[in-house]
Image (tube, rainbow, N blue to C red):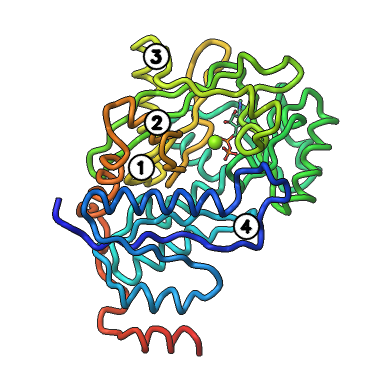
Amino acid sequence: MKRLHIAVVYNAYTENEPEMPDDRSGTSDLVTMVRNVARNLRRLDHRVTVLPLAHDLFRFQRRLRRLNPDVVFNLYDDVVHGALYDMRLAALVRMMGFPMTGSPALALGLTRYKFMTASLLAGAGIPIPPNTAILETLSAVRHHKWQFPIIVQASQEHAGIGLDRSSIVYSKKALRAKVREILVNYRQPALAQRFLPGREFNVGIVGGNRMRVLPLAEVDYSSLPGEIPPIMSYAAKWVESSTEYQNTKVICPAEVEPELAQRISDVALQAFRAVGGRGYGRVDMRLDESGDPYVLEVNCNPCIDEGMGLARSADRAGISYPKLLQLIVRAALERQPYDMDVPMFPGASVGQLVATGTK
Ligand SMILES: Nc1ncnc2c1ncn2[C@@H]1O[C@H](COP(=O)(O)OP(=O)(O)O)[C@@H](O)[C@H]1O
Ligand SMILES: [Mg+2]
């Protein structure tokens, strides 16, 4: 690949830093990852500029325009609960006419709405957990026939936000209490679905027009004490000192019979395509009691920290970290079918763009 000028974009907000010191979901870990991505891209001989977006959108826009990179590496991730900024940033970059890594705005926005995503997948014939429902009011609980256990989560969050030890409920009363908690605390509808007790897999995907599924990873809850539900809760994902974190492991490659592995991979790829995902993604899946796979969540632009998640799966496929980044950049530069690959204001100078924006 020829030498490229790559702008690595990330969110530099610090207002919503986690309160607990051992919570790894804050900006400092993101900054460490951003630096590491930049370093690895430089190792591939690309010219890299790291471009943070904090509070000044127009300054960001001016800088991006001045840099005029060959491609934007999008590491922007929401930090504000319920926010949809990553979708807006992706739209902005594309409106300015720059190729961008990962998924387009539509896929980023859509997949943040878990019920919309689930409805779309169901419509496309892709298996989702039974009893999937969105609850916008407490009284809506009455209008469904529930088959417990049910798992309840915030319908527009990601990263385990709102998932804790009380997220799996066994009665209508507990379901109502959990729905109320989500409506009040997260100010958004709750998503309820049947809790699937089977094995859990993360399926990594990489590529542009030709996508490939990476070796499967399995979430291993076997050492978790019996009273803690086997789910990727907020604590399991981020809080290093928690019992959940310390007893939830990921096995990669997962030990799965080839036939089942193929089924899981096929369903994951179908799901990623259905939401319009691109470049790289991770589909979270779980088996029911009879061993059939269902899609829990499609993650567009998932974490690509070295040695974890997608990067670990890539490594097991013989794709080194720099190589993975190179594949992601290459996918961004491929011509995308049906994409209007033109800037929205082709003739406008930076000054004009900013003037229109600030008026
Ligand atoms: N229907 C379900 N059945 C079993 N476990 C579930 C279900 N939905 C979510 N989970 C558990 O909760 C975790 C987080 O759910 P997910 O939908 O992936 O949201 P997030 O965006 O927080 O990752 C999953 O990794 C899984 O462990
Ligand atoms: Mg998930």
| Mark 3 lies on residue | 260
Residue in the image at 30% along x and 84% along y: 348
For the residue with label 3, is its CB less than 8 Å from the closest atom of ligand 1? no
What amino acid is at disc 4? Answer: Val
Q: Gap between marks 4 and 2, in whole Å?
A: 27 Å
Per the image, label 4 sits on a secondary structure element best described as: loop
Residue 24: x %, y % from top left: 60, 43
Q: CA distance from mark 4 to mark 1?
A: 23 Å
Q: Is residue 249 left or right of residue 48?
A: right
Per the model, the C-alpha gap separating discs 3 and 2 is 21 Å
Q: Nearer the viewer, mark 1 or mark 2?
A: 2
Find residue 280 and name its label: 1
Residue at 33% of width from left, 61% of height from top? Answer: 72
The reply to whether the C-beta atoms of the residues labelled 3 and 1 are less than 8 Å apart is: no
Q: Earlier in the sequence, mark 1 or mark 2?
A: 1
Residue 34, placed above or below residue 193: below
How many angstroms separate mark 1 from mark 2 (CA)?
13 Å
Q: Disc 2 marks which residue? A: 312
Please tell me which residue is depicted at 23% across the width and 44% down the height of the picture.
Answer: 209
- In the picture, measured across the screen, residue 305 lies left or right of residue 94, that is right
* Residue located beneath label 4 in the image: 80
Where does ligand 1 appear, by image quarter?
Answer: top right
Residue type marked 2: Arg
SS of the residue under disc 1: strand
Residue 193: image location, x then y, percent: 64, 31
